[in-house]
Image (cartoon, grey):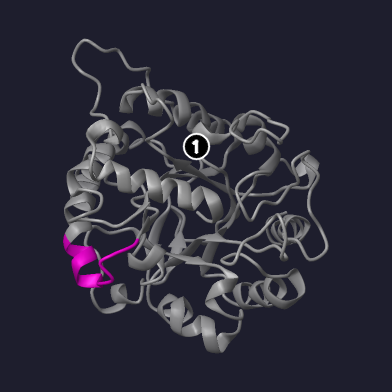
Amino acid sequence: MKTSVRKLLTTVAALAAVTAALALPGPASADEAPASPPEASAAVPWLSTEGNRIVDSSGNPVTLRGVSMIGPRHNNECAECNPQPMADHIARATDPARGWHSNVVRLPVTEWAPNDSLSLADNIAQHVDPYVQQAVDLGVYIIVDFHRVQDYGSGGVPQDLVREFWEYVAPRYADIPNVLYEVYNEPINPDSWAQWKSYIQPVVDRVRALAPDNLILMGSPQWSTRLNGAVNDPIAGGNIVYVYHLYPNQGAATEAILDPKFGNAAEQIPVMLTEFGWNPAGEWSDPVTEGTTSEWGAPLRAYLDARPHISWTAWAFDNYWKPQMYDHDWNLLGGEYQGQFIKQWIAELNG
């Protein structure tokens, strides 16, 4: 997550470390009656990993290509934007009739909101369940993303909060092959793979005990840019894909720069970019995301197209969170902006 929204979430997360007011609510109590979870129907194939690839239940290689939504709880926050329901966004992003051919959508789950009164059970029932069911009905994959942008462990997100979230969510969708679990969006510090593994391994152990088959997407420290640690010291649990988040502030999209970041690792372990994006300087970008289609987006496409073992979701299918693909009135941004380029890219490879 980028721009002012990242700053807002980081600020709120910092406050959560010193006040219980924003702590993640616990699971439903015995006298609550949370809604029933979605049900799988004509399901997509289960996904697993084999070597450095994602494969389907027949062992055929699968490349997931799609887009990331914004957190549903924040969909109507932009005063100058033309709001549309999250279900409409997902329908649009997966609709070949409108030129969109995403075979996966990413759904950030933020567990706070101003004057929050939702329990974890209500949050999931209102802001996750409907879209999981929609993905099932559409026959696409959906990433349920625990969307924290914060330090982990001491001084950051306590491990038990992450575990509490997944102990509720993991079994809820354990029988639905459409659902992938992104365990922690962007842990920041400590900048240590060993410390991160020590922190997140018990969470993964619980997910695997409760949901043995769902693909797990694994972030890393420094805003999910340290996946190289997994090459020699992988997380235990099986069917784990390692996540990288990439933006223009990290440098040009060349082999010389991208290979050491994640390309070399992707020759040995499964890798997925669950966030990347760009827009030219101006109101639709910031110092992290500032870039152009010709100088950054097109070279990145060439790099990823040559490496179909790397799956991806582009950020963000929205008219609000930067770098967005649409302007405030839902006109797709073209030229040096990313929207039309990503739409065509997905259509050419998935259509």
The residue carrying mark 1 is 43
Q: Residue at x 43, y 39 (%)?
A: 109
Find residue 64 and report its horizontal and vertical position in percent. 55, 57
Q: Residue at x 21, y 50 (%)?
A: 203
Q: Height in image: 326 above or below 153? A: above
Q: Residue furthest bottom?
A: 256
State whether residue 263 appears in this view: yes
Q: What's the amino acid at mark 1?
A: Ala
Quarter containing the C terminus: bottom right
Q: Residue at x 46, y 55 (%)?
A: 56
Q: Nearer the viewer, residue 72 or 320?
A: 320
Residue 7 shown left or right of residue 105 in the figure: left
Badge 1: residue crowd in 10 Å (few <14, some 14–19, many ≥20): some
Q: Nearer the viewer, residue 198 or 24?
A: 24
Residue 254 shown left or right of residue 269 in the figure: right
Q: Nearer the viewer, residue 249 or 236?
A: 249
Find residue 106 and report its horizontal and vertical position in percent. 52, 47
Q: Residue at x 30, y 39 (%)?
A: 170
Residue 105 shown left or right of residue 239 in the figure: right
Find residue 224 and report its horizontal and vertical position in percent. 40, 64
State whether residue 63 appears in this view: no
Q: Is residue 194 magenta?
A: yes
**SS at circle 1:** loop
Q: Is residue 121 magenta?
A: no
- Report the span colored magenta: 188-198
Find residue 311 and report its horizontal and vertical position in percent. 53, 63
Residue 30: quarter of image: top left
Q: Height in image: 46 above or below 310? A: above
Residue 81 shown left or right of residue 3 in the figure: right
